[in-house]
Amino acid sequence: MIRNILASLLLLIPLVSVSIAGQSRPFNPDSDVNYISKHATLDKSAATIKFKSERDGWNHMAYLFKGSFKPNSTYTVFFNYRNPDVPDQNAILQFYARNTASEIPQADYASKDLPLRNNWTRGFISFFTDANADKYALGISSKYPMSCEIKDIVLKNGSPEDFVPIKSESPIEVDRNSLPTGAKEFEVEMPRPEKELIVNASEFGLDESAENCATIINAALEHCKKIGASKLVLPKGRYKIFEETPIKINGMKDFEFDGGGSTFVYRKRYSGNMAISYCVRTRIRNFNMDWDWETDPLASLVRVVKVVPGEYVDFEFYQYKNFPNRNVRVSNISSYDRKAKSVGIENGATISYEMKRGLHTPPKTEWLNGNTLRVFSVPNKTPLEAGQYYRMQHNYYEMGGIAMNSNKHLRMEDINIYSCCGQATHVRGTQQYWLFKNVNIAPPKGKSRRPISATADHCMIETSAGYFKMIDCDMGFGADDCINMHDNSLFTTKASANSVRTKSARNSYLYNKGEIFEFREDDYSPTGFTAKVADVKVVDKENGVNEIFFDKEIPNPQNSGFILFNWRYNTSNVIVRNCYFHQNRARGILIIARDVTIENCRFYRNEMGAIKIETGYTFKSWSEGLGVNNVVVRNCSFDTCNPLGVRNENFERDIFMGVYMRTDPSPIRTNFPIIENVLFENNKFKDTFGLVAFISSCHNVTFLNNTFENTKERKTPRPYRGSFYLSHTNNVKIINNKFMLSDFAPNPGIFTDKDSVKNTVVAGNEIVEKK
């Protein structure tokens, strides 16, 4: 029987604390201290630890409770802490559960960075143990100068969250008027030339033997612009671009670029592949992009053959007898699953050496023979072991594939990016109304030595004016997100009656003279105040500190400063339909936008999770997003996502919704619902590695008519597998879903932080017993 429940009378399930049950005991300073640093002191009479660190690097202060943990159990350590002195704004206080024998951070049960506080603050860290529990202890470290006091330490069996088990009930009727609707349909216009005037690039000397084909194509494009041609056609061929010049399509209107099925092969060091800027009603289509793998592979599969901790590691390029590039660069390595042909394995690792060419000192290397490389950069404590397999990248965030800036009504169709250095596609400026139709970013099939497509993101939207449609696209094997859609914000502190100061030079394009900003508090709550930039002055060029002056007096912030939103950029109204996101490093889709529909898509082995919905700011690095609203994810499949086991609050998850504040990641949450109106409907989740979803700082999130099934065993079982976690939420509904029980996920339910969660609805779900 279907029960009718009005929106105003939704069934509120009482939260029953079942997971925290268990014994607890206070910290014993005589028996529970396994190590104490010379920078720390232990007051046994008060059971208090105090320390003061003065150097910039990591400072390990203490190990506690070794020998207190049992295998396959849940523990929480509670404590009070404070930072008596105002610390460096970059300082970090970190608690973690670590194997004291190996001391490898990647093997931590959990790690947690705590917000620094002058007053006594209650904190905790929770973790799940495995068979090696007797080797683990609770560690405490600091980074950068700071002081800290820790007292009232208690070890408790169980987790700190309340838990609501899912029960079988009759389905309920849903008021669809209360649900998000997602993006509105729209069209990206075709070119409308006044006359048909076609130019052939062969007339300008385009030839497969040339190595400067970008220069030749650019000459043809300039001619098209000069005479008002409607189309440039390329004869089908394999064209080499071994020069530091991109193909430039700039300022075209009612124009078509037809690659004729050609393939552009690149080999260079600095410039991007193609730049499309300030075009109107332009169609770019029918070509392939690739890299010169024969002489300069972008990435390789390697096997660890020898490790000497603190000295070197030897990598065998096992697909080669003689690796072609003897000046090979080691950018980063990611654990590799040879059977799945994918990065990301359970308990695996990612190690970064040089993110961007020239920004860091690369490790010293030496060839031992034709296919074995010695890398002289290994810490004393390393996850590297002989016999492991990795994908080694030789490039990361350099150059780029197709860069798009401030176009309007741009159609990208029938394009294959088999490989490229950097982000395969990148959008910035005020681009509006653009389409990806059958744009595929994946290696050609049957090429065993091609383990990577893009060496960074597949599709990066840095800023835009919205209205993006992606249809029938394949995004896989790249080294970062399949889609990252966002705008940027700016954290500032008040400097005078009418000015603020930045913390760094990042996102300086946002505050040109005349730009209008909305001011938000540092928890994202609105101030109701907007102002126009009147002037900008450099305060500290070396550290990127600028002072922004406004046309009127600004209010005082309630806390540490203001987050500034520039709504001239507004990535919104995004439709992603019938696409495949798979076997990539990082996430499937990062949604930091408004009015978004993701439908009929497949997500498979996205290394760090399928979908991340967030907004956040940091003091020194990225600050992305102006909030998230009205997102619909429906009729999609999620299979084996987050195999690397990336965690939030020690919970591995397929879906993440939340914020980061001051640092990324961040332990700080906000009660202001900067993320609201999100619907997951009619999706199938198969073999989640942990939670289905971690949901925080959200309002009105609904999981409706989804199916959850876990048929594969994990190396490390998680007691929360197939469940949900809620913190700082209001009006979350888990309704009319089907949970298929198995030995690997026998008890799905809802974990909640009871003090910050309101109006949770768990109703109408079906439990299907295992056969």
Image (cartoon, grey):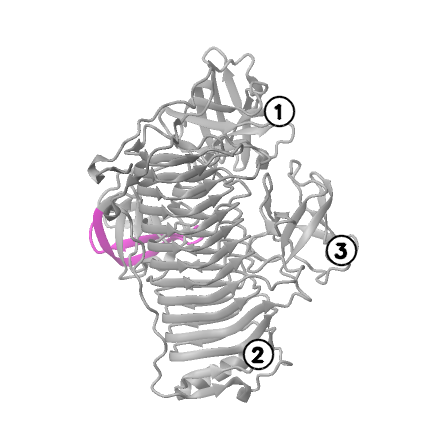
Residue 492 visible in image = no
Residue 535 vs residue 358: left or right? left
How many numbered discs sit on the rendered protein?
3
Magenta part, dominant SS: strand
**Quadrant of the image occupied by residue 191:** bottom left
Q: Are marks 1 and 2 in contact (CB under 8 Å)?
A: no
Report, in whole angstroms, how far the alpha carbon at label 2 lies from the one at label 3: 33 Å
Q: Residues within 10 Å of mark 3 (few under 14, many from 20)?
A: some
Q: Which region of the structure is painted magenta?
A: 528-553
**Quadrant of the image occupied by residue 521:** top left
Q: Is residue 537 magenta?
A: yes
Circle 3 sits on which residue? Answer: 371
Image coordinates of residue 676 in percent, x first then y, are 30, 45
- Secondary element type, mark 2: helix
In this view, the residue farthest toward the front is: 1
Q: Residue at x 31, y 62 (%)?
A: 185
Residue 49 vs residue 673: left or right? right
Q: Residue at x 29, y 49 (%)?
A: 180
Q: Residue at x 43, y 66 (%)?
A: 436
In this view, the residue farthest toward the right is: 369
Residue 151 lies, with reference to residue 112, above or below; the image says above
Circle 1 sits on which residue? Answer: 135
Report, in whole angstroms, how far the alpha carbon at label 1 lies from the one at label 3: 38 Å
Image coordinates of residue 216 in percent, x first then y, are 54, 82
Q: Amino acid at mark 3?
A: Asn
Q: Are marks 2 and 3 in contact (CB under 8 Å)?
A: no
Residue 183 lies, with reference to residue 29, above or below; the image says below
Residue 585 lies, with reference to residue 724, above or below; the image says below
Q: Nearer the viewer, residue 659 or 256?
A: 256
Disc with the residue nearer the chain's start (1 vs 3): 1
Q: Amino acid at mark 1?
A: Lys
Circle 2 sits on which residue? Answer: 213
